[in-house]
Amino acid sequence: MKFSHEIRYAASAADVYAMLADESFREQVCSAGGALRSSAAISQNGGGMAVEVDQTLPATGIPSFATKFVGDEIRVVQKESWKDGSRADLEVLIPGKPGHMRGTVTLAENGGETVETVIGDIKVSIPLLGGKLEALIGDLLASALRNEQRVGRTWLAG
């Protein structure tokens, strides 16, 4: 399943990139998203950075057809490999479960606003239910990105 989501910030791309490079920001996003446990690790590499956010979320609100696959909690690992301040390769994994997303994150500044665009392919390898689970993962990812936008707007405002 194809996935695409945009986040808009009233800030420069450099400020948005600096926010994304801050472990405290990543932890605040996890906390605001209801994570039961989380960690964020960011390492600089030349002009880019490597990001890994590992969080465990409650499976509340998950449709009954999906609960037998995910259980009471869902562990999600997000890995970003930023080449520079404008583009990253993205991988979202659900360890021990048959689903993942691979794609990109881009930052583009235009007229004092920065657009963060997440594009990827969601894949669940379960016959018959794969499409439903892919749509569910897409909905959960979009919700997580809306949460990131709320936290990010507050962060950037000061």
Image (tube, rainbow, N blue to C red):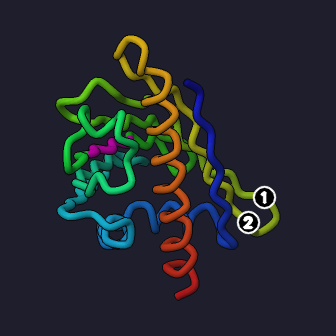
Element under label 2?
strand
Contact between labelled residues 2 and 1, with CB atoms less than 8 Å apart? yes
Residue type at tag 1: Asn
Q: Quadrant of residue 96?
A: top left
Q: Looking at the picture, how far across and down is residue 64, in whole percent?
A: 35, 40
| Residue placed furthest toward the right | 111
Residue sitting nearer the eye, 60 or 18: 60
Element under label 1?
strand
Measure how far apart labels 1 and 2 are at the Cα level: 5 Å
Q: Looking at the picture, how far across and down is residue 48, in whole percent?
A: 41, 47
Q: Looking at the picture, how far across and down is residue 80, in whole percent?
A: 38, 43
40 vs 153: above or below: above
Residue sitting nearer the eye, 23 or 62: 62
Residue type at tag 2: Glu
Residue sitting nearer the eye, 132 or 115: 132
Q: Looking at the picture, how far across and down is residue 36, in whole percent?
A: 20, 64
Per the picture, the main secondary structure of the magenta-coloured stretch is: strand
Q: Which residue is mark 1?
A: 110
- Total of numbered circles in the picture? 2
Q: Which residue is mark 2?
A: 113
For the record, the magenta segment spans: 76-80
